[in-house]
Image: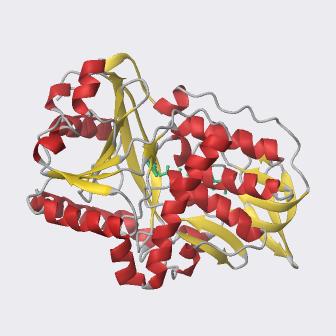
Amino acid sequence: MLVPLAPEYTPGVLWQDTATPHPVTPQPLPAKADVVIVGGGYCGLSAAGELAQRGRSVVVLDTHDLGWGASTRNGGMVLPDLKAGPASLTARYGELGLRLHAAVEAAFDHVEHVIAAGSIDCAYERTGQLYLSHGERAPARLDALATELASVGSAAHVVRGEALRAEVGSAAFSAGLVVERSGGLHPARFHAGLTRLAEAAGASLHPHTPATAVTRAATRWTVSTPRGVIDTGHVLLATNAYADSLVPTLRRRVLPMGSFIIATEPLAPEVAQAVLPTGRMCFNDRHLLWYWRLDDAGRMVFGGRKRLGSVGLEEARDYLYRSMLEVYPQLAGTNVERAWGGQVALTLDRLPHCGQEGGLWYATGCNGSGVALNTWMGHRMGAAIDGEGLPAFAELPPRAIPLHSLRRAWLPLVSTWFQLQDRRAT
Ligand SMILES: Cc1cc2nc3c(=O)[nH]c(=O)nc-3n(C[C@H](O)[C@H](O)[C@H](O)COP(=O)(O)OP(=O)(O)OC[C@H]3O[C@@H](n4cnc5c(N)ncnc54)[C@H](O)[C@@H]3O)c2cc1C
């Protein structure tokens, strides 16, 4: 099938093309700082803002433009989500499980607070989320998840039949779980707001400045860059899926995985209303999941991955268009305006990790849900560097991905297994 492309179609990130980045004031690289943060996404900037507000001198480095990584490429879904409900987390981790769930709820509240307190104009709306299931056995699983969430005070309910049709204009699903505490935002405008807040608090921001080496110098650190070296008391690595060879141990703990998104041209208001009457943030229950939403101009923004391992942008775009039509056949013929991809960081336990590694602070492993979590993680890591306790995720044992350097060889096998499971479940 030939995917219809809008006359203005370009491969590129819709959000980057519809936001004005905060103009960072160019300045010389400081020779000394209390803290150097590597990575200028949500996590790095949140940490920078927190530390600067606490009176610390902070330098943020990014190899590319600030926000070049996942923070301006994502779906903009603000989800209190850990891929497992509070009861499953408690079954796995005991009392720590409840604290992990509480952390993700706190992350959601934190993002809403930052947007309101920092007057960030990012089209944020508390839309709620809709977790959709294809299979016949789904309703029982969704009922159990709703009960789990209710047990910790999260409003969630299962919809089927007429109630399901009132949520989503699609016959592809057997049931859905509505969780009210979720929202949607414009990722790049949110990032621009965090950049503005970090700079206003006094952080020194340096795009196009890769950290090329970090070495111990007695009780301090030396961070090398092509523009000079910085002597610092602390280093925070906030590189998530884009970790390079700077600290190989951390790089081996996450599997960088491509995720792709297409955005259609704006839908006519009556079509937008028919496909997503309640404007929820949607995703389905497959291993190779689809996620979708409308943006503030009424475009259908539809994401997912065809398989694990490498996929070209055009192949991903065409796959996502076909997938979108499986959900919404009525969108056949709708033009695509943009297609892009980015990397998410998967961990072995599918949970984020943070703490200290050889004296270096780090936060990593968004597992595809980091708009709320990595923003909050940055804020909490900033507080931890200033002497407060670490987030509960620091108590999870860190584990390297087995055969990390051979992943191109084994990922296709895992991918085939996921595809088979997904087919069996529908
Ligand atoms: C396509 C896609 C869709 C997604 N959708 C959602 C969603 O809807 N909801 C959700 O919650 N999450 C989503 N996510 C995940 C979310 O975007 C990420 O979890 C989050 O943006 C991570 O932020 P971060 O600051 O930790 O990392 P990033 O924003 O990835 O920033 C890391 C930065 O580190 C820099 N860096 C790396 N090495 C160095 C070095 N040596 N020196 C200097 N800089 C360096 C990189 O250049 C990069 O800019 C999605 C991700 C993708 C890719």
Q: Nearer the viewer, residue 181 or 221?
A: 181
Q: Where residue 413 sits in the image (x, y, percent)?
A: 25, 66
- 98 lies above or below 224: below
Residue 65 showing in the rendered view: no
Q: Nearer the viewer, residue 22 or 389?
A: 389
Q: Image point 86% across, 56% down: which residue?
A: 57
Q: Quadrant of residue 153?
A: bottom left
- Position of 135 with respect to 35 (left or right) is left
Q: Where residue 263 sits in the image (x, y, percent)?
A: 37, 30
Q: Image point 56% across, 47% down: which residue?
A: 112
Q: How is the image coloured?
A: secondary structure
Q: Nearer the viewer, residue 31 or 145?
A: 145
Viewport quadrant of the N terminus? top left
Q: Residue furthest right?
A: 31
- 425 lies above or below 165: below
- Position of 379 with respect to 31 (left or right) is left
Q: Image point 15% across, 65% down: which residue?
A: 140
